[in-house]
Amino acid sequence: MAGEINPFASLQSQIDEAATYLDVDDDVIERLKHPERVLETNLTVELDDGSLERFKAFRAQFNGDRGPYKGGIRYHPQVSRDEVKALSGWMTYKTAIVDIPLGGGKGGIVVDPADYSETELERLTRTFATELTPIIGEDKDIPAPDVNTGQREMNWIKDTYETLENTTEPGVITGKNLASGGSEGRVEATGRSTVIAAREAFDYLDKDLEGATVAVQGYGNAGWIAAKLIDEMGATVVAASDSSGGIYNADGFDPVAAKTHKNETGSVVGYPEADEEITNEDVLTLDVDLLIPAALENAIDGGLAEDVEADVISEAANGPLTPEADRVLEDEDVFVIPDILANAGGVTVSYFEWVQNRQRFYWSEQKVNAELEETIVDAFDALVDAIEENELDNPRTGAYVVAIQRVANAFGEAGSFP
Ligand code: GLU
């Protein structure tokens, strides 16, 4: 992993690249390259043994021109100020490409949750929620799950906020469990959009998804659901990996059984139906029809990109390719469905959850999935139009052309204050 590549610099270079195709003033582009504000805070939390520990945490509110800031909160040792700034920018352009009325934000705590008990994590989460309470709200900033957070953490944040504010406001956060006001289909939504986008790309490229081979890097919530759904569409999952390593079977394996094995043992490694052990790097460079990077940013740098053999990449993770990798893959005619579209299912169903929370009227899973399908297909069509109109070789640039224009339009219409 190219840890030295700064994701915020990557975001800015992606914006600059797209700006060359846009008739948007440089001073507006400059605004769209920086977060409006970043909260940096130190959380002091009591551990189970009575000692205190300090944790650094951030919330970046990148852009609110199209609606309240929106984006997840991750718990990871690699969280940094620049990482959340980048991720909040990607959220801004993600909500714009799928055209939902939200802005972009992101937060994180520098912590490896595996090192702490559930009660310690609850105190940590509630302490962060207390810091966030003045700046979040269903019309201000709406957090959600991200790497290493899920329904449990969202429920704690909602409860802390509602207690402090003496209100009921389930739409203050999304990704909650159903009993706390969550939406049907939210857990699967990121993986679902990754495969809908892949299906659309195969169709656009006149490639057959039936029987296509697939490698999935990262077997968390996004990766494993994508594996399961692409298998249901008739493709063959031949490789998967997690932080402990990778597995391979040229004839394919059952992605659900591989997940069960991971649940039982902590890793996909050792899953008997795919007993050829390969490295994480091997998974990324296999000769497959579709590669789904579903772990962290910078998984593929320029050097590794030279060895990538996939025809299509659908980015379930945020920022898995460095800008250098993007250039290499563009030269090699690999069709990369950018993260801001491929993984936008998560925030799209978060938007549906927020709508349901505000209306106090809940949808069936079928309705959620049908609305998600339409949203992702419309976004893919807008991307194809941008690629063709501007004669672009890199779909990421096409996605940013559409997204930046939408944010710039909202800013332009509103004007600036004072
Ligand atoms: N963390 C997810 C993302 O990166 C979901 C964000 C949300 O639902 O607000 O898109």
Image (spheres, rainbow, N blue to C red):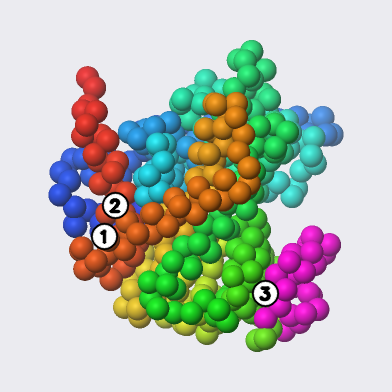
Which residue is denoted by mark 2 in the rendering? 402
In the rendering, which numbered label is found on residue 46? none
In the picture shown, does residue 231 fall above or below 156? below
Binning the other alpha carbons within 10 Å of mark 3 as few (below 14), some (14 to 19) or many (20 upward) gives many
Stretch of the chain drawn in magenta: 252-276
Neighbours of disc 1 within 10 Å: few (<14), some (14-19), many (20+) = many
What residue do we see at 73% from left, 33% from top?
Answer: 179
Q: Position of residue 57 (x, y in %)?
A: 56, 36
Q: Which residue is mark 1?
A: 386
Task: Give the residue pinned by disc 3.
Answer: 246
Quadrant position of residue 10: bottom left
Q: Quadrant of the C terminus?
A: top left
Give me the residue at 54% from left, 26% from top: 358
Q: Is residue 243 above or below residue 114?
A: below
Disc 2 residue type (three-letter): Val
Q: Residues within 10 Å of mark 2 (few under 14, many from 20)?
A: many
Give the foreground label among 1 and 3.
Answer: 1
Of badges 3 and 2, nearer the viewer stands 2
| Marks 2,1: beta carbons within 8 A | yes
Residue 379 % position (x, y): 38, 54
Disc 2 to disc 1, C-alpha distance: 7 Å
Q: Is residue 65 left or right of residue 224?
A: left
Closer to the N terminus: mark 1 or mark 3? 3
Inspect the image, locate mark 1, and give the three-letter code of the amino acid beneath it. Answer: Ala
Q: In the image, is 29 to the left or to the right of 260?
A: left
